[in-house]
Amino acid sequence: MSTTAMFPPGQKLPNDQFTGDAFLSPLVSRDKNNDFTVGSLIYEPKTRSYWHSHPKGQILIILEGEGLYQEKGKPIRTLKKGDVVIAPENTPHWHGASATNKMVDIAITNYKGDDQATWLQPVTDEEYDSVQ
Amino acid sequence: MSTTAMFPPGQKLPNDQFTGDAFLSPLVSRDKNNDFTVGSLIYEPKTRSYWHSHPKGQILIILEGEGLYQEKGKPIRTLKKGDVVIAPENTPHWHGASATNKMVDIAITNYKGDDQATWLQPVTDEEYDSVQ
């Protein structure tokens, strides 16, 4: 695993959408060609998003570390460098770092109209700790 | 720079579009939410694309190594880990590795209808060697 930071650390994401310390470095803004945003995110260990959904889905590409991803009603999936997640539309899910490692990923988030995400409730410790 | 291969090496790209050895590992296919493809590319040193254009542009995110990017009529831009290129639509350009390093990048390539690229002539040694 590279120890060189790839992108600037970015801005801390709000704690009404993320539990713990997650940081976003925006890479690409929406424009006439690109109907999505691209950003790099760093999740400190144990940090995870709230449950949320995307009206037109999201792609995650894991660059470093160890992560977790879960869609409602499915088992937690573990993620490592090089893994790709294609989150479907309107599907509640969460993603974050493992309990012992940070995770760095690139997120490509599509727009539907002007909407990118609907935020739901936090991931409880019981939900987070249920990883196999 | 990480020495761990992030993605499988992928398939060699054709020499009527790339000069030298470039390899594509497809990560995301076009589907109803994602009107683009995402792939990871490895360019061996001195390897570069032909001149080409994209009808709805392309995004490159440099993961490793050292690269070059040039739009027609502009100076060659050098690229390093963490750099992002937003190639505009219908603009002849090329990209590749430097003479001494490989480059690894992620490419997000939009569709316009069913088209992603128009291929043009090779980048000559004189053009390639004109990097400052």
Image (tube, coloured by chain):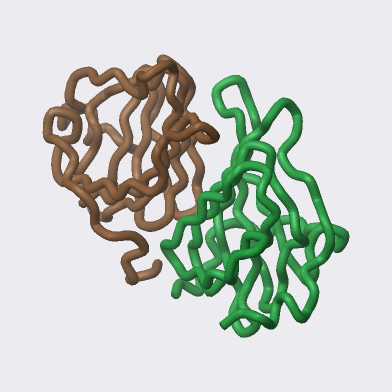
Chain colours: A brown, B green
User: B35 or A124: nearer the eye?
Assistant: B35
As drawn, A46 above or below B101 = above
Residue in view at x 23 percent, y 48 percent = A23
**x then y, percent, for residue A107:** 41, 41
Kindly indicate the quadrant of the structure image that contains residue B81: bottom left
Residue in view at x 53 percent, y 60 percent = B6
- B13 left or right, relative to A9: right
As drawn, A95 above or below A55 = below
The quadrant the C terminus of chain B occupies is bottom right
Residue in view at x 65 percent, y 67 percent = B96
User: A117 or B87: nearer the eye?
Assistant: B87
The quadrant the N terminus of chain B occupies is bottom left
Residue in view at x 42 percent, y 16 percent = A113
**x then y, percent, for residue B98:** 61, 77
Kindly indicate the quadrant of the structure image that contains residue B38: top right
User: A123 or B116: nearer the eye?
Assistant: B116
Question: In the current view of this chain or complex, which residue is farthest to the front?
Answer: B73
Could you tell me how many numbered marks the image carries?
0
**x then y, percent, for residue A86:** 50, 32
As drawn, B98 above or below A107 = below
**x then y, percent, for residue B126:** 76, 81
